[in-house]
Image (tube, rainbow, N blue to C red):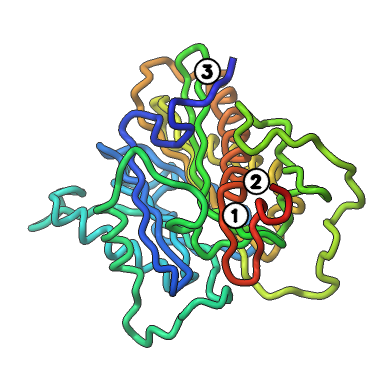
Amino acid sequence: MIRPGPRNLITDLDGLRVGNAGDLGLRSGTTVLLPDWPMTMAVDVRGGAPGTRDTEALAADTLVERFHALVLSGGSVFGLAAADGVTGWLSAQGIGLPLGPRAVPVVPSAILFDLANGGDKDWGEANPYPALGRAACEAASRDFPLGNVGAGIGAKAGSLKGGLGSASAFGGDGLQVGAIVGANPFGEMVMPGGTFWAWALELDGEWGGRAPGRIDGPLPDGFPPGPPPVSNTVIAAVATNLDLTKAQATRLAMMAQDGIARAVRPAHTPFDGDTVFAVATGTLRREVTPRLLAEAGAMAADCLARAMARAVFAAGPLGDKPSWRQLYG
């Protein structure tokens, strides 16, 4: 039987901490996933407008086998600089590859688009994101809030306020998965009437237990008739306690992408940058058979869908986007 972990957060998995930093005036922020030891990581990119850094190093045929942090940030291309702050902070702690006079951390990252949300973006050449990356590292903990925090501060979810979400799922055989997401999709996450598309995956009433409504047509009401601005992206990570190779972690990330499709309608549009990382903590010492990997991938997809719904459920209103609670709570 699948159940949430004690926090219902990705940090229910041993060895993981999450730090958030942001600026409500900026209407943007950064989230950092910090492992207690270097971990296997992979990525799957499925949206039409992604923004990433160091993802090529995650390929199964590349040199580096373990990674030192993961950054999910707002700020579009400017937010990629949050990884500068994270790599500097880690290197100062001696964390990274021993390649020279100082440690060289490898820190993949992805960004979401929140530049058009009405915040103060007039920073000139003084990019605020490196400082946000460092602050997020300093704040890293196993406990953290959801909604309008970190990478979720400026997020939008269709017609609703998006946010930062997380969830965990524990199986009876010791298998554990978790997910964290900056939920900023172009598509809608609720049916007419406010029921989340992911309603059937809810555990322990984590977003209100609302029953489903009627599904009308392939696209949600109000879907723009012409090309909309490029202003969305879902960026996420799933984690498992299995000891995976990079190739196996890539398959986990690919399966986990279906969690976006279970939570958003439509998903993976030309206007999204759907990017999902997979992290393996390696604390469960079991042979990773194809069946076990498939089980982990299925759990990860469901967990990511739940994390997305939790992001919107927890988010408060900001700017021109109302919160779910304002309309349906």
Query: Which label belongs to residue 44?
Result: none
Query: Which label belongs to residue 260?
Result: 2
Type of amino acid under label 1: Asp
Is 2 left, or right, of 79 in this rendering?
A: right
Query: Which label belongs to residue 171?
Result: 3
| Residue contact between numbered discs 2 and 1, judged by CB atoms under 8 Å | yes
Q: Is residue 155 above or below residue 218?
A: below
Image position, residue 129 (x, y; %): 35, 69
The quadrant the N terminus occupies is top right
Among numbered discs 2 and 1, the one appearing first in the sequence: 2
Image position, residue 329 (x, y; %): 69, 47
| Residue contact between numbered discs 2 and 3, judged by CB atoms under 8 Å | no
Q: Nearer the viewer, mark 3 or mark 1?
A: 3
> Which residue is more in the foreground, 189 or 145?
145
Query: Residue beneath label 1, please?
Result: 274
Place residue 280 in its image quadrant.
Answer: top left
Is 37 left, or right, of 300 in this rendering?
A: left
Identity of the residue furthest to the left in this view: 101
